Amino acid sequence: MSRILELFGHSTAGDYDWLTIVREQQCPYSGRKCFKIRKSESTVSIGTCVVAQGREVKPLIICPNKFLADNGRVFTDVIHLMELHEDGNEIHLLREQAIPGGSVDYFLVSAKAGKAVDFIGIEFQGLDTTGTVWPHRQAFLASKGINVPEYEDKSFGVNWKMTAKTILVQLNHKISTFEGMGKKFVLVLQDDLLDYMKSEFAFGSFAGSRSEDSMHFHAYRVTAENALVNIELVDKLSTDARGVEKAMSLGKSGNLVLQDVLDKLTTRVDVANLFGP
């Protein structure tokens, strides 16, 4: 069994035209070319989305774009956190908006008459790997009868600690900005990563999803069966900026006026970005 469970958005247990898939290098979740480029070959995308790890062959997401599966269900799972959203408002999904503390992966925006009235910041976090997945990718393609160049037989692992520390530092830099504006910030991650963070960091102030909290964690379980790799929301936790600070040292807080963010989002709202039901 291959340790690559999903390649370019397709389950490796499925019967596909792998030669065409690898040639096109498209990510079906983002609708773009896969952004995971080989360092030694800038024109070649790696394409690995989900891998198997451990004796239990646990499916682990190593590409954050996997969270875009199922027509963006992770976004519909957070709409209720927009307190000013009303029935009939437009819902827009905007990529990468800079705020004090860094760039946010997505903004889900509620707009009325073309003007942003509310929003949620959303960050995706996949798992970082050590070593290289490339030999396993090539071995899988060779097993499907595709000629691949020779490659070294190397292994890879999952860097749980670095993944967790990196995202907590990023949250520390951004959450005070959202809390200062009275808005919600959501981290979308795999349930296994959340379990690791609970065990290794001070998560005592985190509890079940509370509407008054600014920082929300939405954890998804990954299953690989019947030639499909699915995600399912299984856990929700929340806290405030102080809770994130307790989990790890608080970084520089941002200072941003709420109306400034609403105005910036309004300039990017248009029907072409409309997020359907």
Image: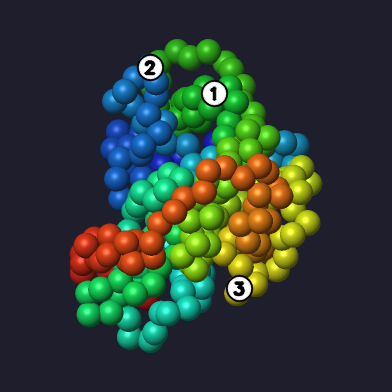
Q: Earlier in the sequence, mark 2 or mark 3?
A: 2
Q: Which residue is disc 3 drawn over?
A: 212
Q: Secondary structure at mark 1?
A: loop
Q: Which residue is disc 2 drawn over?
A: 40
Q: Nearer the viewer, mark 2 or mark 3?
A: 3
Residue 132: mark: 1
Q: Nearer the viewer, residue 168 or 252?
A: 252
Residue farthest bottom in this picture: 87
Distance between mark 1 and mark 2 Cα atoms: 13 Å
Who's the residue at 29% across and 45% down the image? Answer: 32
Count of numbered circles in the view: 3
85 vs 48: above or below: below
Who's the residue at 71% across and 60% down the image? Answer: 206
User: Could you classify mark 2 by the number of other residues whose Cα lies within 10 Å: few (under 14), some (14-19), or many (20 or more)?
Assistant: few
| Quarter holding residue 128 | top right
Q: Please name the amino acid that badge 2 sits on.
A: Ser
- Residue 179: x %, y % from top left: 53, 62
